[in-house]
Image (cartoon, rainbow, N blue to C red):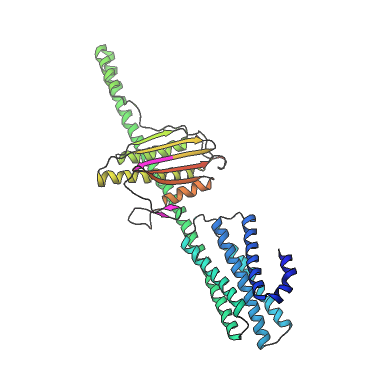
Amino acid sequence: MSLVLGGCELPAQILFPSLFLIVRTLVNGLAGFAYLYLRSDYYWKSKLVMWSSMFACCCALSSIGGMFSFLTGEFLVRGAMEGVVRCLIATLGIPLALYLHAFNFQKYQSIPFSGMSVILIGDASVLVFVLLEIFWAGADYRITVSFAVAYICILGMTLVAVWAMHDMCAEQADIIALQAESQRLQGERELFRATEATLEDLRCIRHDLKNQYSYMQILLSQKRYGELEAYFQQLTDHLPAQLNYIDCGNRAVNAILNMEMGKAKKEDVQMEHQLVVPPVLPFAEDDLCALLANLLDNAIEECARLRQVKDLPVSLRLEIYPHRTYLYIMCRNTTDRKQLQRRGTALSTTKADGRLHGYGTRIISKIAEKYNGCAEFGLDSGNFVAKIMIDMLSGETGGVTA
């Protein structure tokens, strides 16, 4: 493409100078976009910001170089010095490229659309000035100076916007990471409390068994077999029909779900479940804990709110089972929400303080995307339904075991 343009440059500049400059600018932009689209593994938003910013910077530097070269020849000295000035300004493309590479958005999966729009508007403004300069610059040195100052200001604002947007995304990612860590620590505290309560129950059971064995020993020694048989029958009648303990075959999932079942029981929320979990999962235990804990915490809180505020009947159901190479997770709970408010790919929180809440669905989506999966949230007949699929072939080695 460059060779074709190079061969046509001289006759085209003579016959259609303005049109040729416009076509060359557009072709260079399309060539850069095609190269970045085919060769880069960045997310599409990161590609768009990188391409538009780099293209605008190149156009701005080319125009600024031409303007300063023109002003050098106009007021200082003509000849080689004009070319030196143009070359020096062109070399600024290297630090600009390094700057954009350092502040790229590749590792951030959620980029606010408003911030990205500010960057793109700044880039578009540079391109508009390029087109205007093609027709107006050169007629008067004052116009050239005005264009040069405008280029520098808009380019500076765009670069500052890139830095500010990158800083915002980094801060948001840190908040999500801290929220996930807080969720994990809270889960560990809940597990510690549950373990402590279980140990206390075991102490009570041991004490009761000791008394029961002593009583049975007395009945046996006195050959009061009828009373002993009646006592055995009484103990049998008081045994629970089944233990409220989840055992899905995976140790880590068992610990998380039993902890969440304890929370649901405290809120008087009945949790139904259908679980077919492989004994070995390739996911990091922290990720699995954060995903399930956020999923069930949101559901339990919503059900508890409806019971306390509106005294409505509630239901909560969790399903986990393999589907081909994916692990499918579905959580459905009663809700009174009529529509979902979204912030990008995540849902807006319904809690009073949105600054401290609302990261649960973001954490879930981020973990799903980490393992080449997806998360979907929706409403269905008065129920909030969350569906997650995570690829069991993309997980880390040495993951969650039974």
Question: Can residue 188 be seen by looking at this rendering?
Answer: no
The residue at the far bottom in this view is 75
In the figure, 92 relative to 80: above or below?
above
Q: Residue at x 71, y 82 (%)?
A: 81
Q: Main secondary structure of the magenta part?
A: loop
Residue in front for this viewpoint, 143 or 8: 8
Residue 203's spot in the image, x, y percent? 33, 32
Question: Can residue 319 be seen by looking at this rendering?
Answer: yes
Residue 115's spot in the image, x, y percent? 48, 64
Q: How many marks?
A: 0
Residue 224's image quarter? top left
Residue in front for this viewpoint, 15 or 154: 15
Residue in front for this viewpoint, 212 or 362: 362
The residue at the far front in this view is 15
In the figure, 80 relative to 302: above or below?
below
Q: Is 306 left, or right, of 180 in this rendering?
A: left
Residue 64's image quarter? bottom right
Q: Residue at x 39, y 37 (%)?
A: 258
Q: Residue at x 25, y 43 (%)?
A: 311
Residue 25's image quarter? bottom right
Q: Which residues are magenta?
A: 330-354
Answer whether residue 324 is magenta in the image: no
Residue 349's spot in the image, x, y percent? 37, 53
Q: Is 335 left, or right, of 371 in this rendering?
A: left
Answer whether residue 345 is magenta in the image: yes
In the figure, 209 relative to 201: above or below?
above
Residue in front for this viewpoint, 398 or 81: 81
Residue 162's spot in the image, x, y percent? 53, 66
> Can you say which quadrant of the picture contains the N terminus?
bottom right
In the figure, 72 relative to 354: above or below?
below
